[in-house]
Amino acid sequence: MFLPGLKWRTKMDSCDLVIIGTGPAGMSAAATAAAHGLEVLLLDEQKRAGGQIYRDVGIASQSRGKILGQEYLDGLGLVDSLANGNIRHVTGATVWSVEQDGTIAWSAKDTASMVRSNRVLLATGALERPVPVPGWTLPGVMTAGAAQILLKQSSIVPRHAVIAGTGPLIYLVAAQMIRAGTPPLALVETQARSQAIAALFRHPGALKAWPQLLKGMDLLGEIRRANVPRHLAATNLRVEGDERAMALTFNSRGADHKIACETVLLHQGVVPNTQISRALDLEHYWHSGQAAFLPVTDEWGRSSQPEVFIAGDGMDINGAVAARWTGALAALRIAADLGKINDQQLQEKAKPVRNSLHQERSIRPFLERVRSCFV
Amino acid sequence: MKTDLPFLEIENEPRRVEVTFDGKQYALPEGGNLAAGLLAAGVTRLRNSRVSGVPRSAYCMMGVCFDCLVEIDGTTRQACLEEVRAGMVIVPSGSEMAHEDG
């Protein structure tokens, strides 16, 4: 294929494992694979390791770390673990072809390269579920995740923003904005209060994960102490404005509201980024609890194509900590596939990882029920 | 006046370099994220839709939505995946579609 302006490297590289994505799943998998003697090519679209959740953690300042919290700083260890001679980490790389025979084409700095690999691990993470309310395309409307990225990477926060939607991230972003000195003008929440409480009692699994629930409540306390107004059971969200967002209107508890603002941060949870798994024609299934299509995988993350594995939020939304464990499990299975460890060693090494993963997953049903798909 | 800008910058940033966006000069943090730099400088329109001509700006900040397309030195790129370099010449993508009073 001729692409004007693109230079080709004539020699085709080869390696044991190509990992696409350098978030917690990709980093954990790379470190685990490298520790077992595998040659790893780690391809990342971003300029620095960390994915979205740990974006730029390697160069974050102290004040930024304080605002973002300990959970963010936990990513530092993962970034450091990439300093291993078996890992070749390429940043600014756009993967534009993944063939079924394990040939991957990518380009960085206007130079295209190809690599042939024994195994491929897709660790491309999640993306925000789009929220197409009227006016959502106006300048000034962004995802809650985008606001977090602006804070993490660039230390900027919107001054006059309304957060609208549902899901744990809206409370985290609100708290981070409060700590940064620009509290949101309001939290417009699209879930009804009764949904949240009912979910708590219907699903005993949620009660096991007290640390996470308590953390959720701390955030609410922070938001309350900052006097951020909360509007519940909001419907009919609409962003008003001509050339840019000027106000958010909505209905809550029978009353119409209009909040003047410059920025609207929308959020309705996250869904797996399945761009590459779809391009590979891997099998997917509809997960009604997450209201998203997920790739079909076995307990190691092996997809419907045996050489292709998937880990992290790109496989199933379970957050950053679970992503470390699924990344490690996939890497262990791949190490066994390629003869670096035997089956008994595989099971022994996998056991503590599975325990940690199970703990992390046990809160999921509660969060699914709190999330509302409808605005 | 800085308090009129939609975004607050928290830290004293590293050295700034001059870039041109839509014909105007801006001093943005060197090596910083381009979309973020432009947003912090008060830019509210990164491009015009080639279909309808309406103004658009950053939405996802992570390279999946393509709403932040700009032309940098003649090549269309996503501003949210670019780093600021001295002397960049950036033009809103689709600016020929902008309304006359836009």
Image (cartoon, rainbow, N blue to C red):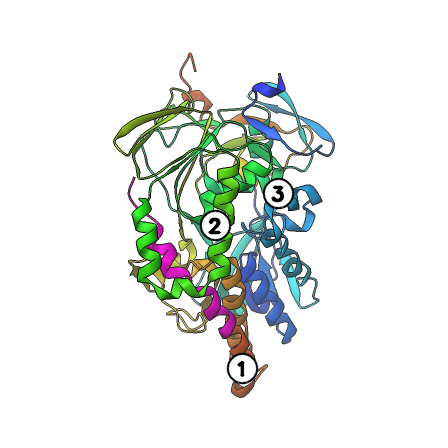
Q: Which mark is residue A67?
A: 3
* SS state under label 1: helix
Say above or below: A85 vs A23. below
- Residue A360 forms part of the magenta stretch: yes
Magenta segment: A354-375
Residue A307's image quarter? bottom left
Q: Give A201 or A17, whichever is nearer the viewer.
A: A201
Parent chain of label 3:
A
Seen at 57% across and 19% down, the residue is: B4
Say above or below: A127 vs B83. below
Q: Give B82 or A220, whichever is nearer the viewer.
A: A220
Return the x and y of residue A350 as percentages of the image width and height: 52, 78
- Which residue lies under the disc numbered 2? A217
Return the x and y of residue A259 as percentages of the image width and height: 39, 25
For the residue carrying disc 1, how many other residues have a C-alpha within 10 Å: few (<14), some (14-19), or many (20+)?
Answer: some
Q: Real-space Cα distance between discs 1 and 3?
A: 40 Å
Q: Give A86 or A81, whichever is nearer the viewer.
A: A81
Q: Real-space Cα distance between discs 3 and 2?
A: 18 Å
The answer to whether residue A169 is left or right of residue A33 is left
Parent chain of label 1:
A
| Viewer-nearest of discs 2 and 1 | 2
* Amino acid, disc 3: Ile
Q: Which mark is residue A346?
A: 1
**Prevalent SS, magenta region:** helix
